Image (spheres, rainbow, N blue to C red):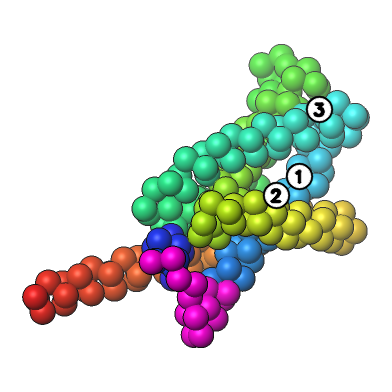
Amino acid sequence: MDYQSSNKTRWANGRKPLGRELGVERLRAVEIILIASICGWFVMELEILAVRVLAPYFGSAVYVVTGSVIGVFLLSLSAGYMLGGWLSRKDNSQRTLGVNLMAAGVWLCAMPFFIEPVCDRMFDIGLGEKLGSLLSALVLFGAPTLLLGTVSPTAVRWLTTRASDSGLSAGLVLAFSTVASFAGCVVTAFYLVLLSMRQTICASGVVLVAVGGVIFLQAVFQSKRNISSKVEISQGE
């Protein structure tokens, strides 16, 4: 379903959607919040797993956990928020978001194969534990975290139908995605770290590819339907 096109027509002529239309809009809102929540889960899951990824090479000192890992995730998310805010203004924002999630998923699926080369390289070029862990975290987790960061501003844009609703839309997205992040933090720290770290990262990548693929295909099918509708209207005229 085309979330952005829906937002453009939802409040046409100053009327609220009624009946079946209102039910459809509520279903769209649930789907949008679910997408933001899924990405919130994976951001926190990756942050917890990043400590375990770097620990064998750089240890688990405070500068690795709070300086390198948390610092890189904060920086990457801020860049993702800015990029997502800019992309959300585009007409093809749904298709773009699907591509972003698929790209993040592919990155995670490939990550276990270049963790060791990246971390070893940091030592080979003479970097210490502090700078080495920082750059390793940036190389390994910067790109997927940035891509996941594009979700929240895009979701807020999709949910916002009027200027007066912007605060509520932002609050809903942030609240649900943060609760999902909490759940991802607890489940990862209590259970997933006990499993294979590489398999967990790959499985997360597969899920992101699937979610992104669904979003992308919905956008493609909706675009084709819109084109068909325009052709029928022009032929009727």
Camera-nearest residue between 233 and 43: 233
Is 122 positioned to the left or the right of 214 in the image? right
Please identify the quadrant where the C terminus is shown: bottom left
The secondary structure type at the circle numbered 3 is helix
Is 7 positioned to the left or the right of 118 in the image? left
Kindly identify which residue carries mark 3. Answer: 67
- The three-letter code of the residue at mark 3 reads Gly
In this picture, is 78 found above or below 165?
above
Task: Find out whether residue 21 is within the magenta segment.
Answer: yes
Kindly identify which residue carries mark 2. Answer: 43
Of the two numbered discs 3 and 1 on the same chain, state the one appearing first in sequence: 1
- The three-letter code of the residue at mark 2 reads Val
Residue at image position (58%, 64%) is: 32
In this picture, is 103 found above or below 71?
below
What segment carries the magenta color?
Answer: 13-27
Kindly identify which residue carries mark 1. Answer: 47
Position in image of residue 15 (x %, y %): 45, 71
Main secondary structure type of the part rendered in magenta:
helix
Q: Residues within 10 Å of mark 3 (few under 14, many from 20)?
A: some
Please identify the quadrant where the N terminus is shown: bottom left
The secondary structure type at the circle numbered 1 is helix
